[in-house]
């Protein structure tokens, strides 16, 4: 795997981690002000910056028509993690969406 595809995978993984950190901050804060100054919010935003930097590197050689749809894989992973961590709903509609997202990402990567 080239450094650019490795960077794309890293961007996706950092994006997932950032989302989980932001949700954790939201769950652990009583007020909106507390949420904004929660260390997990700051960490989540910092992780998003790292994700963006990795994504920018990936765009050097990967067409945006492939890179951007690939990021959708993070939506499926976050949905599963949200179910496992916070017992958010994961019924048939969500599972069907995850399958469709996964199928779309795989199709985008076909040559």
Image: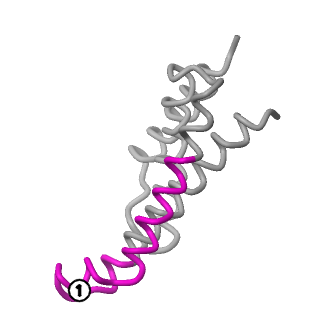
Q: Nearer the viewer, residue 55 or 19?
A: 55
The image shows residue 3, relative to residue 67, as above or below, that is below
Q: Nearer the viewer, residue 24 or 64?
A: 64
Q: Position of residue 17 (x, y in %)?
A: 53, 63
Span shown in magenta: 25-53
Quadrant for the C terminus in the image: top right
Q: Residue at x 66, y 44 (%)?
A: 9
Q: Position of residue 79 (x, y in %)?
A: 46, 55
Q: Residue at x 73, y 42 (%)?
A: 6
Name the residue at the right extreme: 1
The image shows residue 14, relative to residue 66, as above or below, that is below
The image shows residue 52, relative to residue 27, as above or below, that is above
Quadrant for the N terminus in the image: top right
Q: Position of residue 80 (x, y in %)?
A: 52, 58
Secondary structure mainly formed by the magenta segment:
helix
Q: Count residues near mark 1 (Cα–Cα under 10 Å), then give few for <14, some for 14-19, many for 20+.
A: some
Quick check: 14 left or right of 29?
A: right
Q: Is residue 48 magenta?
A: yes
**In this figure, which colouring scheme has been used for the structure?**
one colour
Quick check: 4 left or right of 51?
A: right
Number of numbered discs: 1
Q: Nearer the viewer, residue 80 or 93?
A: 80
Name the residue at the top extreme: 111
The image shows residue 15, relative to residue 32, as above or below, that is above
User: In the structure shown, which secondary structural element does the residue marked by tag 1 occupy?
Assistant: helix
Q: Nearer the viewer, residue 1 or 86?
A: 1
Quick check: 29 left or right of 104?
A: left
Q: Is residue 31 magenta?
A: yes
The residue beneath circle 1 is 34
Q: Position of residue 39 (x, y in %)?
A: 40, 83
């Amino acid at each position: 795997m080239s450094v650019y595809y490795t960077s794309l995978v890293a961007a996706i993984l950092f994006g997932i981690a950032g989302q989980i950190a932001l949700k954790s901050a939201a769950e652990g804060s009583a007020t909106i002000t507390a949420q904004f100054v929660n260390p997990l919010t700051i960490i989540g935003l910092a992780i998003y910056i790292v994700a963006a930097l990795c994504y920018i590197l990936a765009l050097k050689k990967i067409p945006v028509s492939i890179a951007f749809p690939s990021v959708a894989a993070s939506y499926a992973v976050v949905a599963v993690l949200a179910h496992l961590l916070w017992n958010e709903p994961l019924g048939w509609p969500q599972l069907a969406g995850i399958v469709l997202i996964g199928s779309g990402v795989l199709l985008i990567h076909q040559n």
